[in-house]
Amino acid sequence: MPHKIILIGIGPEALTAKTEALLEACPVVVASSRHRHLVPNGKEIIAITPVQQTLDLVAARLQDGPVAVLASGDPLFFGIGRTLLKTVGRDRLEVHPALSSVQLAFSRSKEPWDDAAFVSLHGRETEHILALLLPHDKVLVFTDGSNSPDALCRQLLACFAAVDDTETPGRYEVMVAENLGQKEERLTSGSLEEISSHSFSPLNVAIFKRQARSQPFSFGLETSALKHSRGLITKDEVRAATLHKLQLPEQGVLWDIGAGSGSVSVEAARLCPGLMVYAVERQEAEQANIKANIRSYQCHTVQLVAGPAPEVLAALPAPDRIFIGGSGGNLAQIIDVGATRLKPGGIMVANAVLAKTAAAAPTLMQEQGLLVDACEIRVTRITATGNEEMSPITIIRGRK
């Protein structure tokens, strides 16, 4: 019968009497350089990385005896435990957790953590980091060399500065815990500005805490609640239908091209806080409206992209969804670039007021290999003083 993997968490007190005995019974030990001093003499030591090579070696050694794996804290919390479960299954894995860096960081900060979110930024793409941090009023972050606490603070500050938001930074407190459980342990607390100017040991976790602002509902902003110019805004009923057609993912990237006031962007960000939204707008007056609406509704996952499409699209991350609310006469080029960049399974939606746009958009999408459907929205607003007939809008959708 194959032997088991004994997965041992290492906390501030290193090994307990029980885990020492378990380790002693294993002829082979998987350990990082940080934990090798805990391995008794005479044991074969396997490096914990590269992971696939390690797993292959462990599978071979299990034929002869149990294998111990040493990992920090609780190995089933953002640790190697998940990989081992997938590889060998529950029956062949025995887990002995220790205090995790999460527990230690919150206890050192005297901060409850039952209401916290947890994010690992190890190897994360930079453009998605804001969507991981901003939705939460309290979040513990597992950092890495590129996404250090000071770098994250600078990125948040730059995000707020981009929309002239001077209020939100003051709502943040950041707590950084370095080298937890070691004699070099250090705790640092401060504002985004203060933490942005510090440097930290590579072995750290950071807690970002923000004073909460109430949001009574997540969808259904009315035109009067949004700053816009001369009535140039996607009407409420059309906006609702458009967002339905977009079938927004919980995470990913949305391009809102010809964003105008940013009404679709803001509603999308409120519906899906983990979505990065790029509001593309060339008119300065509308850019100011977008900034104001981002500030009002704290939708900082909406990034204003100032300039004309399709020229500015090349610098944006590949989209999961594209909404074309205005094209500035460049509909063919925008659909061409958008369809090329759109991820597999992605959706493109274009709203057409003019008959020529409604006729051209389906053909242009089909030429790019998209599966197209369309509908026409006619809205009549009924009031005590009479009915208001609104211009019909054609919504064209292309699926990749």
Image (tube, rainbow, N blue to C red):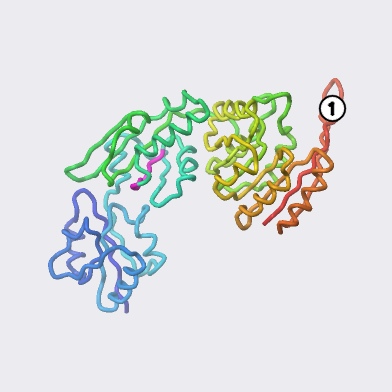
Query: What residue is shown at x 70% (from left), y 46% (from top)?
Result: 349
**Residue located farthest toward the front when viewing the structure as drawn:** 311
**Residue located farthest toward the right when viewing the structure as drawn:** 386
Magenta span contains residue 206: no
The part of the image, by quadrant, that contains residue 114 is top left
Residue 265 picture location, percent across and down: 62, 37
Residue 256 picture location, percent across and down: 64, 40
Above or below 253: residue 284: above
The part of the image, by quadrant, that contains residue 254 is top right
Residue 197 picture location, percent across and down: 32, 32
Above or below 27: residue 156: above
In this rendering, would 108 be left or right of 232? left
Between residues 157 and 48, which one lies in front from this camera angle?
A: 157
In this rendering, would 385 be left or right of 240? right
Query: What residue is shown at x 51% (from left), y 25% (from top)?
Result: 164
- Dot 1 crowding, Cα within 10 Å, few <14, some 14–19, many 20+: few
In the rendered image, which quarter contains the N terminus?
Answer: bottom left
The part of the image, by quadrant, that contains residue 393 is top right
- Look at label 1 and name its amino acid: Glu
Query: What residue is shown at x 81% (from left), y 45% (from top)?
Result: 358
Q: How many marks?
A: 1
Question: Can you identify the residue that label 1 sits on?
Answer: 388
In this rendering, would 190 be left or right of 317? left
Magenta span contains residue 142: yes
**Residue located farthest toward the top when viewing the structure as drawn:** 385
In the rendered image, which quarter contains the C terminus?
Answer: bottom right
Above or below 300: residue 71: below
For the record, the magenta segment spans 139-145
